[in-house]
Image (cartoon, rainbow, N blue to C red):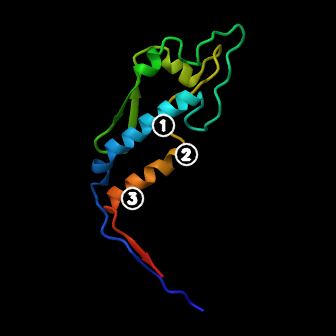
Protein backbone atom coordinates (compact mmCIF):
# COMPACT_ATOMS: atom_id res chain seq x y z
CA UNK A 1 0.00 0.00 0.00
CA UNK A 2 1.29 3.41 -0.85
CA UNK A 3 0.09 6.78 0.29
CA UNK A 4 0.39 9.72 -2.01
CA UNK A 5 0.84 13.23 -0.79
CA UNK A 6 1.77 16.54 -2.25
CA UNK A 7 3.73 19.24 -0.53
CA UNK A 8 4.00 22.54 -2.34
CA UNK A 9 6.53 25.01 -1.06
CA UNK A 10 7.07 28.24 -2.95
CA UNK A 11 10.45 29.72 -3.65
CA UNK A 12 11.80 30.98 -0.32
CA UNK A 13 12.17 34.66 0.40
CA UNK A 14 15.95 35.11 0.47
CA UNK A 15 15.54 38.33 2.43
CA UNK A 16 13.41 36.70 5.13
CA UNK A 17 15.65 37.95 7.94
CA UNK A 18 15.22 41.56 6.93
CA UNK A 19 11.45 41.22 7.15
CA UNK A 20 11.58 39.09 10.34
CA UNK A 21 14.19 40.70 12.54
CA UNK A 22 11.98 43.33 14.21
CA UNK A 23 9.33 40.76 15.08
CA UNK A 24 11.97 38.34 16.36
CA UNK A 25 13.61 41.10 18.37
CA UNK A 26 10.26 41.90 19.99
CA UNK A 27 9.87 38.21 20.93
CA UNK A 28 13.36 38.17 22.47
CA UNK A 29 12.63 41.29 24.54
CA UNK A 30 9.29 39.89 25.71
CA UNK A 31 10.92 36.55 26.58
CA UNK A 32 13.42 38.45 28.71
CA UNK A 33 10.64 40.30 30.57
CA UNK A 34 8.71 37.09 31.17
CA UNK A 35 11.79 35.26 32.47
CA UNK A 36 12.65 38.15 34.74
CA UNK A 37 9.11 38.27 36.15
CA UNK A 38 9.23 34.53 36.85
CA UNK A 39 12.79 34.84 38.28
CA UNK A 40 14.03 32.06 36.02
CA UNK A 41 17.01 31.51 33.75
CA UNK A 42 15.79 32.42 30.22
CA UNK A 43 17.81 29.60 28.65
CA UNK A 44 16.97 26.58 30.80
CA UNK A 45 13.96 28.02 32.67
CA UNK A 46 15.30 26.92 36.07
CA UNK A 47 14.54 29.18 39.00
CA UNK A 48 17.26 31.57 40.12
CA UNK A 49 18.94 30.52 43.33
CA UNK A 50 17.59 32.36 46.37
CA UNK A 51 19.70 34.85 48.30
CA UNK A 52 21.70 33.72 51.28
CA UNK A 53 20.36 35.05 54.61
CA UNK A 54 19.96 37.78 55.60
CA UNK A 55 17.95 38.70 52.52
CA UNK A 56 16.17 41.79 51.35
CA UNK A 57 12.46 41.90 50.65
CA UNK A 58 12.83 43.05 47.03
CA UNK A 59 12.55 40.58 44.13
CA UNK A 60 15.77 38.93 42.97
CA UNK A 61 17.95 41.17 40.75
CA UNK A 62 15.55 44.06 41.18
CA UNK A 63 16.57 46.21 44.12
CA UNK A 64 16.43 49.45 42.14
CA UNK A 65 15.25 48.23 38.73
CA UNK A 66 18.22 49.89 36.98
CA UNK A 67 19.57 46.67 35.46
CA UNK A 68 16.26 45.54 33.98
CA UNK A 69 15.15 49.01 32.92
CA UNK A 70 18.43 49.83 31.18
CA UNK A 71 18.57 46.59 29.16
CA UNK A 72 18.21 47.27 25.43
CA UNK A 73 18.03 44.66 22.68
CA UNK A 74 19.35 45.06 19.17
CA UNK A 75 19.44 42.82 16.09
CA UNK A 76 22.25 42.94 13.57
CA UNK A 77 21.34 43.79 10.00
CA UNK A 78 22.82 40.81 8.17
CA UNK A 79 22.91 37.87 10.56
CA UNK A 80 20.46 36.47 13.05
CA UNK A 81 22.44 37.86 15.95
CA UNK A 82 20.69 39.49 18.89
CA UNK A 83 22.64 41.59 21.34
CA UNK A 84 21.74 43.13 24.64
CA UNK A 85 23.32 46.11 26.32
CA UNK A 86 22.80 47.05 29.92
CA UNK A 87 23.43 50.40 31.59
CA UNK A 88 24.97 49.04 34.81
CA UNK A 89 28.40 47.53 35.38
CA UNK A 90 27.22 44.69 37.61
CA UNK A 91 24.95 43.06 34.99
CA UNK A 92 27.73 40.79 33.74
CA UNK A 93 28.53 39.56 37.24
CA UNK A 94 24.96 38.34 37.69
CA UNK A 95 24.91 36.86 34.18
CA UNK A 96 28.08 34.82 34.64
CA UNK A 97 28.39 34.57 38.42
CA UNK A 98 31.62 35.06 40.36
CA UNK A 99 33.60 33.16 42.96
CA UNK A 100 31.51 34.89 45.64
CA UNK A 101 28.18 35.23 43.79
CA UNK A 102 25.98 32.54 42.28
CA UNK A 103 25.05 32.86 38.64
CA UNK A 104 21.59 34.24 38.00
CA UNK A 105 21.53 34.32 34.22
CA UNK A 106 19.00 36.94 33.14
CA UNK A 107 19.79 37.15 29.41
CA UNK A 108 19.59 34.41 26.82
CA UNK A 109 17.40 32.39 24.50
CA UNK A 110 16.29 28.85 25.23
CA UNK A 111 14.44 26.18 23.33
CA UNK A 112 11.02 27.42 24.49
CA UNK A 113 11.38 30.55 22.39
CA UNK A 114 11.64 28.59 19.13
CA UNK A 115 7.89 27.94 19.29
CA UNK A 116 7.39 31.69 19.23
CA UNK A 117 9.88 32.16 16.39
CA UNK A 118 8.30 29.53 14.11
CA UNK A 119 5.19 31.47 12.99
CA UNK A 120 7.28 34.57 12.22
CA UNK A 121 9.78 32.56 10.19
CA UNK A 122 7.06 30.64 8.36
CA UNK A 123 5.28 33.88 7.48
CA UNK A 124 8.41 35.63 6.21
CA UNK A 125 10.45 32.77 4.76
CA UNK A 126 7.70 31.40 2.53
CA UNK A 127 5.44 34.45 2.77
CA UNK A 128 2.84 32.22 4.41
CA UNK A 129 2.29 30.21 1.21
CA UNK A 130 2.64 26.48 1.38
CA UNK A 131 0.22 23.59 0.97
CA UNK A 132 0.07 20.01 2.08
CA UNK A 133 -2.51 17.61 0.64
CA UNK A 134 -2.99 13.87 0.83
The percent position of residue 10, horizontal first and vertical second, equals 32, 70
Q: Which mark is residue 122?
A: 3
Whichever of labels 2 and 3 marks the residue nearer the N terminus, that label is 2
Whichever of labels 1 and 2 marks the residue nearer the N terminus, that label is 1
User: Rounded to the nearest whole Å, what is the CA distance between mark 3 and mark 1?
Assistant: 20 Å
Please report the residue visible at 39 percent of the width from the left and 37 percent of the height from the top: 82
User: Rounded to the nearest whole Å, what is the CA distance between mark 1 and mark 2?
Assistant: 9 Å
Of helix, strand and loop, which one carries label 1? helix
Please identify the quadrant where the N terminus is shown: bottom right
Q: Quadrant of residue 84?
A: top left
Q: Which mark is residue 67?
A: none
Compared across the picture, whether 106 is left or right of 66 comes to right
Looking at this view, name the residue that lies furthest to the top. 54
**Tags 1 and 2 in contact by the CB under 8 Å rule?**
yes
Structural crowding at the residue carrying mark 1, measured as other residues with C-alpha within 10 Å and reported as few (<14), some (14–19) or many (≥20) = many
Please report the residue visible at 38 percent of the width from the left and 52 percent of the height from the top: 120
Looking at this view, name the residue that lies furthest to the right. 53
The answer to whether residue 32 is visible is yes
The percent position of residue 22, horizontal first and vertical second, equals 32, 42
Look at mark 1 in the image and give the residue it sits on: 31
The answer to whether residue 79 is visible is no
The percent position of residue 67, horizontal first and vertical second, equals 46, 18
Please report the residue visible at 63 percent of the width from the left and 9 percent of the height from the top: 56
Look at mark 2 in the image and give the residue it sits on: 112
Of helix, strand and loop, which one carries label 2? helix
The percent position of residue 132, horizontal first and vertical second, equals 43, 75
User: Rounded to the nearest whole Å, what is the CA distance between mark 2 and mark 3?
Assistant: 17 Å
Q: Quadrant of residue 50?
A: top right
Of helix, strand and loop, which one carries label 3? helix
Compared across the picture, whether 103 is left or right of 36 comes to right
Structural crowding at the residue carrying mark 2, measured as other residues with C-alpha within 10 Å and reported as few (<14), some (14–19) or many (≥20) = few
Whichever of labels 3 and 1 marks the residue nearer the N terminus, that label is 1
Amino acid sequence: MSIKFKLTIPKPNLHWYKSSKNELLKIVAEHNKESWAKEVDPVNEKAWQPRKPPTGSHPLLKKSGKMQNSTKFKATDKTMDFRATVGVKYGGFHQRGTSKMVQRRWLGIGSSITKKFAPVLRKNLFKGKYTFTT
